[in-house]
Image (cartoon, rainbow, N blue to C red):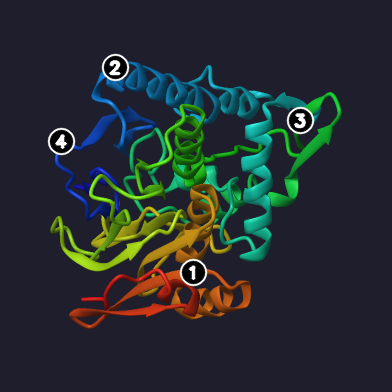
Amino acid sequence: MKIKRILLVASTIGLLSSCDKPDASRALVLEGKTMGTVWRVSLAGVDAARKPALQQLIQRQLDEDDHQLSTWKSDSVLSQFNAYQGTAPQPVSADMADIVTAALRIGAKTDGAMDITVGPLVNLWGFGPGKPPVHTPDARAIAAAKAQTGLQHLRVLQGVSGQWLQKDLPSLYVDLSTMGEGYATDHLARLMEQQGITRYLVSVGGAVLSRGRNAEDQPWRVAIQKPTDRENAVEARVDLQGHGISTSGSYRNYYELDGKRISHVIDPVTGRPIEHKLVSATVIATTALEADGWDTGLMVLGRERAEKLALKEHLAVYLISKEGNGFSHWMSPQFASFLIDKPH
């Protein structure tokens, strides 16, 4: 049986793109690759002579983040935790403890829709390191994979001497890719501040964060793309006002199996890929990590439940749904304050 697989092609900022096209003589732009995607840093008021040193510092930081979070590298900190088939607490860095703590909190608020232990289901449906399935997984296979998941099996322990992760299910598999881009983006922002740089737009994959103003002394602007395969199709533009932004979408990363489109977004509750009409969820938050965690959970919930949760939690959210041959959008009151112009 032939399987048509269409992989996500990472643009500079994934499902988001910078509206600013700064003159190279006035802005410093650095780019590279990390975590299977791309990173980009745009700086204003920085001497071009600093570019080689900054490029090296940025790549070193992102390589370290990848060493912490990768599930594709067997020697990463997370892979070693996953490989450990026991229940004793395992030491981790403060940053690793922070990202898991945030994931557990957002997971609880989304009733488990954002679940960093969903790896066995992701792998079952062919979006992990292995190949896509030849046939649609049956109920027994889904139930077996679900039995190996659950946020209730994972704890973060904090003490004066350090931090630890503990699982009470030895086979528990933690995958932080849903928040890794936001985590790394926040690190880039922190690195810029440490270097005395206060005017920047930084991004890793689909997570973006800005501070200050661009090279033309204007706000850094980011465009939310329309849910199509056509690049530079702008849905709306926002001024981040020093916040982070992240988008989760279901329309670019999928394959076709048994004549049906299989989305990479897996619902941990059903154990199956989502089938609702919500195709894109964008969140603006104080950090890129926070935005990156919420967008995944809202995407899993679907439009109606996502709207209710966004209003309850006072989140800045922009949702796009498939409606017949077109699309419809909804935004929370908090998101509207970031808009530069009306959605197209």
* Label 2–label 1 contact, CB within 8 A: no
Answer with the quarter of the image where residue 82 lies. top right
Question: Mark 1 or mark 3, which is nearer the start of the sequence?
Answer: 3
- Residue mark closest to the camera, 1 vs 4: 4
Question: Mark 4 or mark 1, which is nearer the start of the sequence?
Answer: 4
For disc 4, the marked residue is 24
Question: Mark 3 or mark 4, which is nearer the start of the sequence?
Answer: 4
Q: Is residue 159 depicted above or below 226 in this figure? A: above
For disc 3, the marked residue is 164
Q: Amino acid at mark 4?
A: Ala
- Residue mark closest to the camera, 3 vs 1: 1
Label 2, label 1: how many angstroms apart (C-alpha)? Answer: 37 Å
Label 3, label 1: how many angstroms apart (C-alpha)? Answer: 32 Å
For disc 1, the marked residue is 316
Q: Amino acid at mark 1?
A: Ala
- Residue mark closest to the camera, 4 vs 3: 4
Q: Amino acid at mark 2?
A: Pro
Quarter of the image with the C terminus in it: bottom left
Instruction: Tell me where residue 327 appears, x and y as whole percent.
Output: 25, 78
* Label 2–label 4 contact, CB within 8 A: no
